[in-house]
């Protein structure tokens, strides 16, 4: 079968090439001009198209995935940092009292204990933006130093001269502090580089103290009140703050690289519980107070390439509450008296964050 196909093919080839082989030079030239040059032109056109395609592919821009921008308050991020807490938590007692022997009224205050809050803390925070306008964040701070400074205990004992300080003492104070903050925010306005946010949140704080008396004396000259510490723990104190709050804030972004965020918050329903244990006197006192708080926060954020950023923040809070304190001696109730618990707190920290 193959041989039968080869014979016609050879015959056709010879037939087609015979005019060219038998022609003279001038006819061959005409033949080449008509057919050969056309083949050359076709080959040249093919080469030209190939070269253009290769050149186009060679100079085609390479598409590189853009690095995700780290915009303030967007996407999911986590931060970890270090900062310093300063201020105090203070309680005062006086005013109306009730005891097993009756009731009455003292001047206010008759006693004040001021506990320092000067410790270094580590912090961690996570945030998630969803539905384009909503944002949820949660963070915690924990002290990693415990030497908080001096606790100051003051007593005004002379009812005829309530402004005269009669007994004063200072104690070395050691603090274990924990703070947690959960916040939900809604961006209700955005234009150009400005954003405005409203939100609600909840702050939980617990401060545990151990105090060792350094020295006690009477500034007014009363006898029998001079004492020095023995190095043992003379007093422990626990105070817990629960602070639901509302806030409004604004964010301004500079070229998507640097941003500033400021917020102002207010709490109308602060709840505070404390426990004061005077070990040497076998006396402990429990307080329960309610009140309000003002909160302020300022943050500056600088975005690095590849989703990293640096965050510098300053927070301030003032708490003012009042209520009642119950006192027990040797486990037996001895009095109930008016109490006020206040706290002024400032925190400054530096954190490193990453946007996912």
Image (cartoon, rainbow, N blue to C red):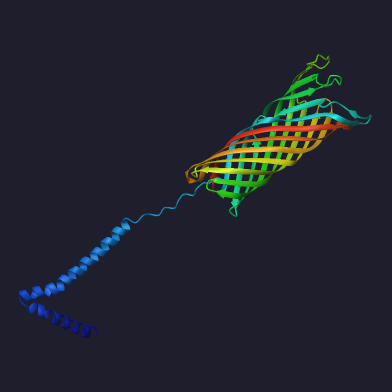
Report the number of numbered marks.
0
Q: In this rendering, is residue 317 above or below 5?
A: above
Quadrant of the image occupied by residue 33: bottom left
Query: Residue 56 appears at what percent x and percent y?
Result: 31, 59
User: Which residue lies at the image location 91% right of the left edge and 29% below the top edge?
Assistant: 104
User: Which residue lies at the image location 87% right of the left edge and 31% below the top edge?
Assistant: 96
Q: Nearer the viewer, residue 326 or 104?
A: 104
User: Which residue lies at the image location 64% right of the left edge and 44% below the top edge?
Assistant: 248
Q: Nearer the viewer, residue 198 or 69?
A: 198
Quadrant of the image occupied by residue 202: top right
Left or right side of 158 for 241: left
Q: In this rendering, is residue 315 above or below 170?
A: below
User: Which residue lies at the image location 86% right of the left edge and 31% below the top edge?
Assistant: 337
Q: In this rendering, is residue 172 above or below 26?
A: above
Query: Residue 34 appears at what percent x and percent y?
Result: 14, 74
The N terminus lies in quadrant = bottom left
Query: Residue 91 appears at what percent x and percent y?
Result: 77, 30
Query: Residue 46 appears at what percent x and percent y?
Result: 24, 66
């Amino acid at each position: 079968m193959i041989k039968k196909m080869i014979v016609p093919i050879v015959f056709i080839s010879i037939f087609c090439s015979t005019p060219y082989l038998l022609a003279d030079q001038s006819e061959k030239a005409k033949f080449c001009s008509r057919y050969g040059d056309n083949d050359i032109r076709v080959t040249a056109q093919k080469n030209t198209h190939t070269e253009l395609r290769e050149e186009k592919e060679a100079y085609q821009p390479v598409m590189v995935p853009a690095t995700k921008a780290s915009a303030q308050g967007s996407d999911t991020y986590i931060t970890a940092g270090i900062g310093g807490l300063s201020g105090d938590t203070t309680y005062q007692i006086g005013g109306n009292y009730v005891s097993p022997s009756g009731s009455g009224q003292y001047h206010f205050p008759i006693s004040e204990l001021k506990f320092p809050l000067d410790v270094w803390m580590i912090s961690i925070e996570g945030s998630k933006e969803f539905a384009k306008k909503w944002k949820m964040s949660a963070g915690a701070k924990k002290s990693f130093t415990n030497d908080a400074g001096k606790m100051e205990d003051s007593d005004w004992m002379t009812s005829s001269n309530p402004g005269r300080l009669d007994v004063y003492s200072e104690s070395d104070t050691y603090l274990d502090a924990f703070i947690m903050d959960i916040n939900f925010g809604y961006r209700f306005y955005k234009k150009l580089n400005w954003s405005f946010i409203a939100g609600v949140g909840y702050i939980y704080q617990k401060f545990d103290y151990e105090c060792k008396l350094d020295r006690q004396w009477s500034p007014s000259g009363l006898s029998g009140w001079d004492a020095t510490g023995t190095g043992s723990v003379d007093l422990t104190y626990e105070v817990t703050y629960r602070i639901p709050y509302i806030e409004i804030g604004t964010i301004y972004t500079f070229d998507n690289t640097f941003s500033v965020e400021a917020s102002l918050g207010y709490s109308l329903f602060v709840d505070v519980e404390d426990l004061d244990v005077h070990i040497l006197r076998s006396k402990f006192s429990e307080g329960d107070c309610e009140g309000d708080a003002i909160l302020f926060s300022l943050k500056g954020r600088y975005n690095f390439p590849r989703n990293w950023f640096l965050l510098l923040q300053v927070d301030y809070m003032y708490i003012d509450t009042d209520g009642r304190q119950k006192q027990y001696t040797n486990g037996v109730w001895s009095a109930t008296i008016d109490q006020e618990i206040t706290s002024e707190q400032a925190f400054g920290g530096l954190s490193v964050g990453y946007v996912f």
